[in-house]
Image (cartoon, rainbow, N blue to C red):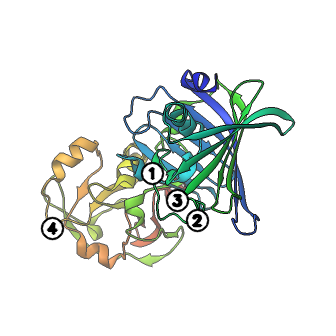
Amino acid sequence: MTNNKLQKITTVQYQSKIEKFDSYSVKLLSSDSNSVFFDFNSKDSIIGAKYLFSGHESDNGFDGSTSFYTIKEKQQLIYESVTSYNDFLSPVLNYSILQLRNLLPQMLRDTSFVINRQSDTIINKTQCYQYTISLHNQEIGFDGKLTDSYNSFFTRDNDGDFHYRLIIEKKNSLPKQFIAYSYKKTPYRIVTYSNYNFSPKFDVSDLNYTKRDPNFVKISLIDLEIGTQKSVPTISTNAKDWSLPSMVGGSIQLSKLNSKLILLEFWFPGCKGCAAAIPDLNAIQKKYKGKGLQVFGIEFTKEDSTGLAAYISKKKIEFPTLYSAKEMARDYKVSVAPTFFLINNQGKVVYKRGGFIREDLINAIEQNLK
């Protein structure tokens, strides 16, 4: 009954409470609750589902091709293109409804799973069935699949067995709790499921990392490794003069520009955070060009313009691109992409930021165009 129900789900929203314990003292180490959404209509070949886990400190999502998580306290969104299960940025899927949905058919047909019915129990005032599940020299891996774990002494007992418990709510035949046990047969992870909704009012656009959390810095996992995000919203230092070749021909020199405000974006091809910012930067140029703003993209990793024209066309970059800027990037102490500078008509740097925060940049532009 439970397996049939899970296989018929197209979309579901539920509450997930994840508790982690110290295996020695059985002391609760952490407890986290999330509102979870799954869309099983996804055509991706990686997990066959889109999802969003919304918690107090972080959100974790997947849109079918890109995985992301947020750090709400720091207003950051980290994302990464996904080609395999190992690319996912967070372990939130562990013992989720997605994994149980995939595991139950295997549990029913694979004799590796030793399943025993136990006495009925009550969880949160709810009558439930409960089953113990044992595996010999195999365990349920991070990806929800069986894996050989002869060296996993933390979770297997002296006989080489791994132990789990599945608790099913009697009223609706849906999972109520899943427990993973350590080698001492004490729980080290308990996941509790509640408040199922199979017709959720959920905006799937929330799974598109480029459209959510507009005030957050959006940076790819690869770009994050380039350097630490730095923000100096209001500074007043002299901008060193420079002259760079332009993709439309000729060269541009800072000291010869007569605009009221200059916006520089340091970027490089393949920078996902840079690419995500392009539509907003195109819009910013259109909106503020007539008010005295001039926007330049500064490609700072290449020696010449090889391949740039095709990339600019593909990404639909509408503002002028300058290149051969390695020395300039060193002078401006650029260590992360994208990095933004605003320079006023007195040649002063009035804004610098590593990472793109749309509202923050627009506020700085408007303040300096007054």
For marks 3 and 2 on the same chain, the one whose residue lies earlier in the sequence = 2
Real-space Cα separation, disc 3 to disc 1, in angstroms = 53 Å
Q: Is residue 148 above or below residue 238?
A: above
Instruction: From the image, tell me which residue sits under label 4.
Output: 303
The mark closer to the camera, 2 or 4, is 2
Given the image, on which type of amino acid does mark 3 rest? Ala
Q: Is residue 269 left or right of residue 182?
A: left
Q: Picture quarter containing residue 74?
A: bottom right
Q: Secondary structure at mark 3?
A: helix
Q: Are marks 2 and 1 in contact (CB under 8 Å)?
A: no
Residue at 37%, 72% (x, y): give it.
335
Q: On residue 364, which mark appears?
A: 3
Q: Position of residue 66 (x, y in %)?
A: 42, 44
Q: Secondary structure at mark 4?
A: loop
Real-space Cα separation, disc 4 to disc 3, in angstroms = 31 Å
Q: Secondary structure at mark 2?
A: loop
Residue at 45%, 78% (x, y): give it.
237
Q: Secondary structure at mark 1?
A: strand
Q: On residue 360, which mark appears?
A: none
Instruction: From the image, tell me which residue sits under label 2.
Output: 154
Residue at 54%, 35% (x, y): give it.
107
The mark closer to the camera, 4 or 3, is 4
Q: Position of residue 56 (x, y in %)?
A: 69, 51
Viewer-side residue, 84 vs 266: 84
Residue sitting at the far front: 159
For marks 2 and 4 on the same chain, the one whose residue lies earlier in the sequence = 2
Q: Is residue 20 above or below residue 256?
A: above
Q: Residues within 10 Å of mark 1 (few under 14, many from 20)?
A: few
For marks 2 and 1 on the same chain, the one whose residue lies earlier in the sequence = 1
Instruction: From the image, tell me which residue sits under label 1.
Output: 147
Q: Residues within 10 Å of mark 4 (few under 14, many from 20)?
A: few
Real-space Cα separation, disc 1 to disc 4, in angstroms = 48 Å
